Image (cartoon, rainbow, N blue to C red):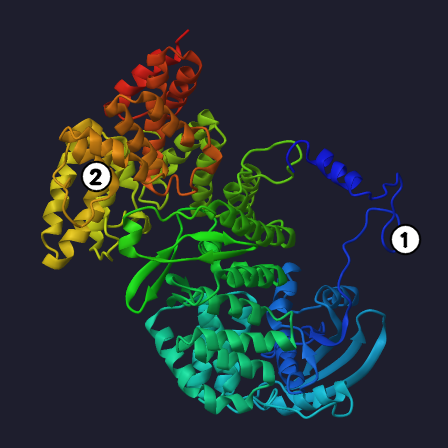
C-alpha cells in the first residue's frame, strides 16, 4: 500500500456511512485476529490420502501413495461420488513435505481435507507379511472428526497387477451399499505386471512434478499394455503440462488421439472427459477441448486439471478470425482473458504445480500472462502471421491482431495497453503470492514474486509495502544453493538496483558477479554491457542468449545457423555501446561472409535481423553503415530517419520522428535525431521519458543487450545536454550515474567517463 493509503481507505469507509467501532470482533464472535473463512465442506467430496506404512514392516513395492492411487481409481467408478482432484492432493502433500512412509497425523489429515473443501477423508494403513499386504481404511467426517463413519479391510498379494479387484471391493465397502451405477474399470486397470509397475513409477514422478520422467514411465506402461486406458490419460496430462515437443511426444500425441474413442468406456466420467479433451488438444481442435474441460468443471469446480486445461485450450489456440461484430477487425478465436483467469484459479488451487517447470517457472508465467509491453500474442489468419498487443475491454482483456507487415509499420500500440497490463500484473502477483505463502522457503517462489512486483513497479522497500522486488530477490539468493541459479539471481539484483536508481550497488553487484564467471553463461553478458565491458560480454554470450536476437524489419521468420546467430550477438554487444569501432567493423564484415552461405531467399531477412539494429545504434558515431538502405525488407522508421539525416532531408526527419518506436533503445536513437535537428529540448523530453521512469524499464534490460547499453548512453547524453544549458543538478545526477556504472569500462569508453567526471563536478 502506498503512503497515505490507510487514510484513503478510512475516508472511503466514513463517506460510505460504515459504523466504526473501537473494539471489533470476528464474524464468529471471537476477538481479532480473525482467520480467513473457508468454504463449507462438501460431504459428497472425498480426499483419499496415502496409507501409512506401519513401522516394523519390511520394504515393499506397493507403498502408501500407490494404495491411495488404486483406491482413488476404485472410488472414481461411482458417478455420484466426487473425488478431490489428485493434483491438489499432490500439492497439499508437497507443501507438508510428506513422503514415504506417509505417517500423516490424524489432525493433519483432517486439516488437509478441510483445506481442500472435502467433507470426507479416507485414512488407511498397510502392513506386509511375506508376500501379502493387509490394508485397513476408514472414512472420517472432516468437519466433526471422531470415530470413522465406515471401516474396511482387505488382503492382497504385494507384487501383482491384479490388486485392482481388491481395491474395488474395498471402495465399495467404504462407500456402503452401491450408491449408484459404476462406470469404468476402477482400480482393475491392467493385468500386466510391467505396465502396473511402470504406471506406479509415473504416478510417483507426477507427485514430484517430474513431468519428463512421468511421461517416460507412462509410455512404458502403454508399451506393456496397449489397452491400459488410465496410462493414456496420465501420459496425455504429462505431455500437455510439460509442453513436450520431442519426437516421442509427437508420436504419443498422435497415438492418444487415435486410441481415445476405444478407451473411454474403461474410464470414470472425469478421466473420460479429460482424455477426450486431450484428443481435441492434440488434434488442434481447441474449442472442442475447451468444451470438454467445461464439462469437468460443471461436475467439479475445484478440478485443477480442468482449470489448467481450460487455460491451455484458450491460450494455445492460434487461429485468427474476422471479428463477428466488425468485419474490418480481427480477433483470436481463443480468449486470452479466460485463459489468464483460469491459470490464476488453477495455480491458486495447487501452487506447487509451479515446480513442474523448474527454474523456468518465472519465465513461463511471464509469457502466459504478458505482463510487459514488449510481449505480443501471435496467431495465424489462414497461413498469414498476425500479432497483437493486449488492450483493455471493460473488465477483460482483448487482442485485435494485425498482420506482420502492418505491425512492422508501427502505430500498433493500443491506447489501453497499460490498463490491460495492469490487469495481467494483478493476476501474476496473485499467483506468485500464493506460491510464496505455500512455500516460503523455496527460492523459485520468491523469484516469481520478485518479478511480479518488479513489473508492477514495486521495486525497493517503502513504508507500508511488506513485499518488494528487491526483498524477494534477496530472499531467493539467500535460499538458493545452486551456483548457476545464484548467478542468475545476481543478474536480477543488478537490474533491480538500476531500476531503483542505486547505481553504485548495481556496479558492485555486477563486478562481483563478473569476477566469478569464467565461461559463457546465459544472461550475464548484459551485465558486462551495462558496465561498459563489451569485449567481456562477447566472450560470455551463451547459446540461450540467441533468443534475444533482433527480428527482421519486415517481421519475416528468420532461421540462422548457431555460429551466425552468435556472431550477430557479439556485434550487438559492441554496437550497444558503439565501441570500439574497429571491433564493430570487423564483425560486420564477418557476418556478411556468414550470410553469403545462406540460401539467396533467406539472406535479406537474415541480414536485416543481424545488421539493422547494430547499424542504427552506431550511426551517430560511425555514420551510415553498409546495411542502411531505403529498399525492403523494411526499413524501419529509425533507419529511414537516419538515411534522411545523412542526406540532409530534415523535413522528412521532422515529419517521421513521432512514428518511430518508443522502447528504450529507440528512445536514445530518437533523442540523437532531435539533437541532430538542433531541438535539444525535445531530445531531453525523449530521454526523460525513460530515465525518470526507471522502475518501468523492461525486465529484459540485461537480456536484450541494446537496452543495457542504450540506458547508460542516454544518461551520458542527458548529462551533456543539461551541462550545455548550465543546469547543474540534472547534469551532475546523470553524469554521476555514468561514472558509477562505467568506472571500470573498457578503454574505448574511458573518454566518456572522463567527460562525465568533469560534468559531475559542475557547480
Task: Give the labeled residue for mark 1.
Answer: 29
Q: Nearer the viewer, residue 199 or 183?
A: 183
In x, y percent, where is residue 241? 48, 67
Q: Give left or right: position of 368 versus 249.
A: right
In x, y percent, where is residue 555? 26, 53
Does residue 379 lie above or below 295 as drawn?
above
Give the mark count.
2
Q: Given this view, does label 1 or label 2 mark the residue nearer the observer? A: 2
In x, y percent, where is residue 269? 60, 84
Q: Nearer the viewer, residue 610 or 237?
A: 610
For mark 1, give the secondary structure.
loop
Residue at 78% of width from left, 58% of height from top? 37
Does residue 763 lie above or below 177 as drawn?
above
Q: Give left or right: position of 58 versus 254.
A: right
In x, y percent, where is residue 1? 65, 38
Q: Which mark is residue 473?
A: none
Q: Specify the quadrant of the image occupied by residue 510.
A: top left
Q: Specify the quadrant of the image occupied by residue 470.
A: top right
Task: Give the labeled residue for mark 2.
Answer: 639
Q: Nearer the viewer, residue 272 or 102?
A: 272
Q: Specify the quadrant of the image occupied by residue 86.
A: bottom right
Asked if the residues shown at circle 1 and circle 2 are in contact, with their CB atoms under 8 angstroms apart, the answer is no
Q: Label 2 crowding class (10 Å Cα cut-off): few <14, some 14-19, many 20+?
A: many
Indicate which disc, 1 or 2, sits on the residue closer to the N terminus: 1
Residue at 44% of width from left, 14% of height from top? 729
For mark 2, give the secondary structure.
helix
Does residue 176 lie above or below 669 as drawn?
below
Residue 201 seen in the current view: no
Q: Give left or right: position of 8 versus 755.
A: right
Amino acid at each position: 500500500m502506498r503512503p497515505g493509503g490507510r487514510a484513503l481507505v478510512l475516508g472511503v469507509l466514513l463517506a460510505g456511512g460504515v459504523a466504526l467501532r473501537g473494539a471489533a470482533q470476528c464474524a464468529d464472535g471471537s476477538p481479532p485476529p480473525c482467520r480467513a473463512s473457508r468454504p463449507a465442506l462438501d460431504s459428497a467430496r472425498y480426499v483419499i490420502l496415502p496409507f501409512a506404512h506401519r513401522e516394523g514392516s519390511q520394504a515393499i513395492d506397493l507403498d502408501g501413495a500407490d494404495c491411495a492411487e488404486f483406491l482413488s481409481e476404485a472410488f472414481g467408478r461411482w458417478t455420484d461420488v466426487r473425488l478431490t482432484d489428485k493434483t491438489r492432493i499432490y500439492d497439499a502433500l508437497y507443501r507438508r513435505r510428506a513422503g514415504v512412509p506417509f505417517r500423516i497425523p490424524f489432525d493433519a489429515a483432517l486439516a488437509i481435507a478441510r483445506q481442500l473443501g472435502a467433507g470426507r477423508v479416507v485414512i488407511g494403513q498397510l502392513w506386509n507379511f511375506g508376500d501379502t499386504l493387509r490394508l485397513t481404511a476408514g472414512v472420517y467426517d472432516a468437519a466433526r472428526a471422531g470415530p470413522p463413519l465406515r471401516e474396511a479391510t482387505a488382503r492382497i498379494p504385494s507384487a501383482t497387477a491384479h490388486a485392482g479387484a481388491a481395491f474395488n471391493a474395498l471402495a465399495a465397502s467404504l462407500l456402503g451399499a452401491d450408491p449408484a451405477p459404476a462406470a469404468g474399470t476402477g482400480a482393475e486397470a491392467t493385468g500386466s505386471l510391467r505396465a502396473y509397475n511402470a504406471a506406479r513409477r509415473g504416478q510417483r514422478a507426477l507427485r514430484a512434478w517430474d513431468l519428463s520422467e512421468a511421461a517416460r514411465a507412462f509410455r512404458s506402461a502403454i508399451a506393456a499394455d496397449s489397452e491400459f486406458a488410465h496410462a493414456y490419460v496420465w501420459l496425455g496430462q504429462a505431455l500437455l503440462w510439460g509442453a513436450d515437443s520431442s519426437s516421442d511426444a509427437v508420436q504419443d500425441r498422435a497415438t492418444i488421439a487415435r486410441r481415445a474413442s476405444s478407451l473411454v468406456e474403461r474410464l470414470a466420467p472425469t478421466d473420460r472427459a479429460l482424455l477426450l479433451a486431450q484428443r481435441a488438444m492434440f488434434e488442434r481442435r481447441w474449442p472442442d477441448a475447451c468444451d470438454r474441460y467445461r464439462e469437468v468443471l460443471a461436475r467439479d469446480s475445484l478440478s485443477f486439471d480442468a482449470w489448467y486445461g481450460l487455460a491451455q485450450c484458450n491460450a494455445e489456440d492460434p487461429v485468427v478470425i474476422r471479428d463477428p461484430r466488425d468485419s474490418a477487425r480481427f480477433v483470436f478465436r481463443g480468449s486470452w482473458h479466460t485463459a489468464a483467469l483460469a491459470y490464476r484459479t488453477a495455480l491458486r488451487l495447487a501452487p506447487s504445480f509451479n515446480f513442474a517447470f523448474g527454474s523456468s517457472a518465472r519465465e513461463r508465467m511471464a509469457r502466459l500472462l504478458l505482463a510487459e509491453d514488449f510481449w505480443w500474442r501471435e496467431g495465424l489468419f489462414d497461413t498469414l502471421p498476425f500479432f497483437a498487443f493486449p488492450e483493455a475491454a471493460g473488465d477483460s482483456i482483448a487482442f485485435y491482431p494485425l498482420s506482420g507487415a502492418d505491425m512492422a509499420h508501427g502505430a500498433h500500440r493500443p491506447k489501453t495497453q497499460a490498463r490491460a497490463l495492469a490487469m495481467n500484473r494483478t493476476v501474476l502477483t496473485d499467483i506468485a503470492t500464493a506460491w510464496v505463502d505455500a512455500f516460503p522457503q523455496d527460492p523459485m517462489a520468491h523469484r516469481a514474486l520478485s518479478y511480479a512486483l518488479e513489473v508492477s513497479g514495486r521495486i525497493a522497500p517503502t513504508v507500508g509495502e511488506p513485499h518488494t522486488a528487491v526483498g524477494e530477490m534477496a530472499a531467493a539468493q539467500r535460499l538458493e544453493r545452486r551456483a548457476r541459479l545464484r548467478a542468475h539471481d545476481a543478474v536480477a539484483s543488478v537490474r533491480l538496483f538500476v531500476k531503483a536508481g542505486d547505481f553504485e550497488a548495481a556496479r558492485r553487484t555486477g563486478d562481483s558477479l563478473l569476477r566469478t564467471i569464467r565461461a559463457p553463461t546465459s544472461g550475464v553478458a548484459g551485465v558486462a554491457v551495462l558496465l561498459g565491458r563489451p569485449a567481456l560480454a562477447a566472450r560470455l554470450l551463451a547459446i540461450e542468449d540467441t533468443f534475444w536476437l533482433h527480428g527482421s524489419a519486415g517481421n519475416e521468420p528468420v532461421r540462422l545457423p548457431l555460429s551466425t546467430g552468435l556472431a550477430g550477438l557479439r556485434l550487438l554487444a559492441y554496437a550497444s555501446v558503439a565501441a570500439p569501432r574497429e571491433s564493430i567493423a570487423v564483425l560486420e564484415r564477418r557476418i556478411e561472409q556468414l550470410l553469403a552461405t545462406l540460401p539467396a531467399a533467406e539472406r535479406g531477412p537474415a541480414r536485416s535481423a543481424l545488421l539493422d539494429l547494430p547499424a542504427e545504434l552506431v550511426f551517430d558515431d560511425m555514420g551510415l553503415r553498409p546495411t542502411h538502405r531505403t529498399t525492403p525488407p523494411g526499413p524501419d522508421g529509425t533507419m529511414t530517419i537516419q538515411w534522411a539525416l545523412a542526406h540532409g532531408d530534415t523535413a522528412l526527419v521532422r515529419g517521421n520522428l513521432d512514428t518511430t518506436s518508443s522502447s528504450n533503445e529507440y528512445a536514445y536513437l530518437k533523442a540523437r535525431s532531435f539533437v541532430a535537428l538542433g531541438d535539444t529540448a525535445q531530445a531531453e523530453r525523449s530521454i526523460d521519458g525513460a530515465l525518470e521512469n526507471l522502475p518501468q524499464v523492461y525486465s529484459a534490460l540485461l537480456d536484450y543487450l541494446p537496452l543495457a547499453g542504450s540506458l547508460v548512453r542516454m544518461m551520458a547524453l542527458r548529462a551533456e545536454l543539461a551541462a550545455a544549458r548550465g543546469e547543474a543538478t540534472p547534469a551532475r545526477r546523470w553524469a554521476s550515474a555514468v561514472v558509477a556504472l562505467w568506472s571500470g569500462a573498457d578503454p574505448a569508453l574511458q573518454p566518456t567517463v572522463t567527460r562525465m567526471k568533469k560534468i559531475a563536478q559542475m557547480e
